[in-house]
Image: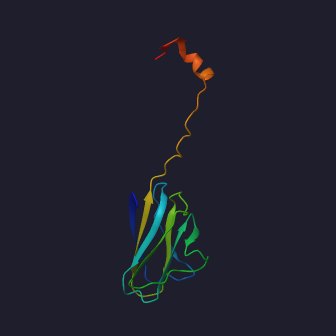
Amino acid sequence: MAEQAFEFAVTIPAGTPVAAPVTTITSIRQRRITAIRWIVPPGSLGVVGFYIGMRGVQVLPSASGTWFIRSGNAGGLASENLPTSGDWSVTGYNTGAFNHTVYVTFECELLRPAPREPEVFTLYDLSDYIDSPGNRYA
């Protein structure tokens, strides 16, 4: 279950060619991404394609140079292995005559440090803290 969700409405302008797609920054704070979900309302009918990237590198779909091409569709990917830097973006083209919006949600958890290993003391280690039998330093 996600602790947080960051939602973005990414509008891809009409007339944006495949050869010169537009990139919209969707950065968040550093988090462990548990899922990325998107909604593409009906109407784009194959003239809109998008991918989700990080720092200029395509992340989803994973095959470089491919696009999600959807219309009236909701989808997503749940994964524990996505990058955590928070420098996300959505890149898309729109060869149609109308602007189209893709809604992207990043579900995430806070990054937490690994739990510390418990420390084990020997009687020798504790001797510095014992004044006399039964008396300990506070």
Q: Examine the rendered structure and indicate whether residue 106 appears above or below residue 38.
A: above
User: Is residue 117 among the parts visible in the rendering?
Assistant: yes
Q: Identify which residue is drawn at 44% across, 56% down.
A: 109
Q: Identify which residue is drawn at 55% across, 78% down.
A: 20
Q: Identify which residue is drawn at 58% across, 74% down.
A: 62
Q: Examine the rendered structure and indicate whether residue 38 appears above or below residue 33.
A: below
Q: How is the image coloured?
A: rainbow
Question: Of all residues shown, which one is farthest toward the top?
Answer: 132
**Image location of residue 98, percent across then percent down:** 39, 85
Screen quadrant of the N terminus = bottom left
Label count reads 0
Q: Identify which residue is drawn at 38% across, 66% down.
A: 7
Relative horizontal placement of residue 5, taking residue 132 as reference (left or right): left
**Image location of residue 81, percent across then percent down:** 55, 63
**Image location of residue 58, percent across then percent down:** 57, 71
User: Is residue 101 among the parts visible in the rendering?
Assistant: no
Q: Looking at the picture, tell me which residue is in the foreground, 131 or 49.
A: 131
Question: Of all residues shown, which one is farthest toward the front?
Answer: 133
Q: Looking at the picture, tell me which residue is in the foreground, 1 or 100.
A: 1
Relative horizontal placement of residue 3, taking residue 78 as reference (left or right): left
Q: Examine the rendered structure and indicate whether residue 118 appears above or below residue 127.
A: below
**Image location of residue 107, percent across then percent down:** 42, 63
Q: Examine the rendered structure and indicate whether residue 60 appears above or below residue 48.
A: above
Classify residue 3 by image quadrant. Answer: bottom left
Relative horizontal placement of residue 56, taking residue 34 as reference (left or right): right
